[in-house]
Amino acid sequence: MHPEKHLVYTGEKVSMGGEFSRLIGHSKGIVLPFIAAIFFACAGVVLTIIGPNQLSKITQYIIDGIATGIDMEAVAGTALFLLGLYVLSAVFSFIQHFILATVTLRLSNRLRADIFDKVNRAPMKLFGRIPYGDILSRMTNDVNTLVQSLSNSLPSMVSAAAQFIGCLMMMFITEWRMSLAAIASTLIGFALMGLIMSRSQKYFLARQSSLGQLNGYVEEMYSGHDVVRISRAEKKMKSEFDRLNKEVYQANRKSQFISGIMQPLMGFVGNLGYVAVCIYGSKLAMDGVIDFGVIVAFIMYVRLFTSPLSNLAQGMTQMQSAAAAGKRVFDFLEEEELEDESGKERYCAPVRGQVEFKNLRFGYSEDQNDAVIRDFSASVKPGQKIAIVGPTGAGKTTIVSLLMRFYELWGGSILIDGVPTAEMKREDVHSMFSMVLQDTWMFQGTVRENLVFNGDNVSEEAIEKACRACGIWDFVESLPEGLDTELTENTSISAGQKQLITIARAMIQNRPMLILDEATSSVDTRTELLIQKAMDELMKDRTSFVIAHRLSTIKNADLILVLKDGNIIEQGDHETLLRQGGFYAELYNSQFDKTA
């Protein structure tokens, strides 16, 4: 568990304009469809706004015709014209919603792909700072929140804005005094909306941040569920989960409470506008300034004028959720990336396997005084088997990570066949090595797919040879469908068998150099001997780096490097180091004594 990795909300404010600008800048393809959607929205709203004017004509025809006779032809013609307006308005509204729905779905697809690509471009140190569960939360929950908020709010906000402006213009054209009365009442709504939004932004970001923390914690607990059970730490873990879950609840409660205030307030403002128009309009009608049909039209206009406020209020609430989610997504997308190596040439020369470490210096933190590797130098000849041993924290795995260019050096250099790895492309360095880690990695797929992972044109004979060398061919044949058996969570396969499959995978890759990081840690002694024999065959004519705590497995190494506190304190073969009676001899004898 690493509680220090959890992201903590610091109260930073979210700028909706800033996040939307980053969204536009990141996905420039949405600009033209968005403009087209605005055009259709405005066209549909304009047609709808003309409707009250036509309805007032029908009302006036009826009022004027009560005494003399209603002109039904005029009423029918105006009604048909009004029906045509509403049909066209509905068509334009459908086109607008279709465009925006398409844009937002493509946007979600683009953002998830960009986050996935970012994971492959991000330096390894980023994953030591941000928990895996939080990254997963950004790819799923935050992207969904962003896209759903946009798809739900943008259409209504675009229509509301167009409707608000159009109604304002038509109201002033119809009767400017009544328009001022309606506007005065709506100013209260704008003031309240601005006040609430300025106070509520932090709660929406807190909601997304706390949810990311919770997802990270759950992912961490499930990945170490066996340790939690055996340690009887369920109550402690439940207590921490309850704390994080309560933070999510509190953040949701505050954000939802504030967003829930908006609709009733806007409803009150809308009713206030009705009252103002009815009272003032009645006075003007009684004074003979306006006709009764104008009051009917204005009642419709006030409804069209104040309803956008409710839509805008609801849209602004959803946009705050989108801004909070967008901030987390774009903050991750704008994290530091690996250096661009497109200008480097591919390394195509045959790999002999000569490796030289020159005065390596490296640390995981930003503090230059906190170095893990302080002054590491070693020379490895082609085809040698190099064992790296030492106490926990000596820097064994770090050396291998630096060799693979998972991290960049603070100082010194690593040369392969005389060429610094810093001058090679990372993928070229990676293609030189096969690696078997202490933590086995298997994905859901067939046994064959796991063995041939990312390999091309691998023959059945090569797969069988590797499996026999690792002693798992009988196990593979015993599976229901052999190599084509699907490996799922329900497949009965032990940790040792998984490790054997990963070792066979390394054999099939057949790379010039090999890295084994505690590769036999999960197998029994008899299986270890079989694997060791297979490994000796595999490592012939290959430069191999073996990290081992069980020193009995590296007796036949050509060179043993003994690390302590990031430096080589002893080096030589097994017999030479034992005769020296130094630190290596102490380590070996202590293990022998424990075994005895």
Image (cartoon, rainbow, N blue to C red):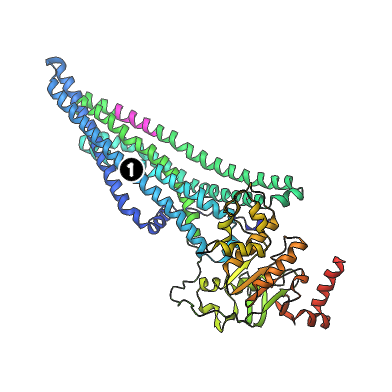
What is the magenta range? 269-278
- Where residue 336 sits in the image (x, y, percent)? 51, 66
Residue 580 found in image quarter? bottom right
Residue under the point 66% across and 51% down:
478
Residue under the point 50% across and 45% down:
200
Residue under the point 62% across and 51% down:
219
Image quadrant holding the N terminus, namely bottom right
Question: Where does label 1 land, which residue?
Answer: 98
Element class at badge 1: helix
- Where residue 265 sits in the image (x, y, percent)? 43, 35
Most extreme residue toward the front is: 461
The residue nearer to you, when weighing 127 against 342, is: 342
Residue under the point 18% across and 30% down:
81
Does the image show residue 382? yes
- Where residue 283 sits in the image (x, y, percent)? 26, 26
> Would you place residue 157 above or below residue 174 in this image?
below
Left or right: 70 as drawn, with respect to 540:
left
Residue 254 found in image quarter? top right
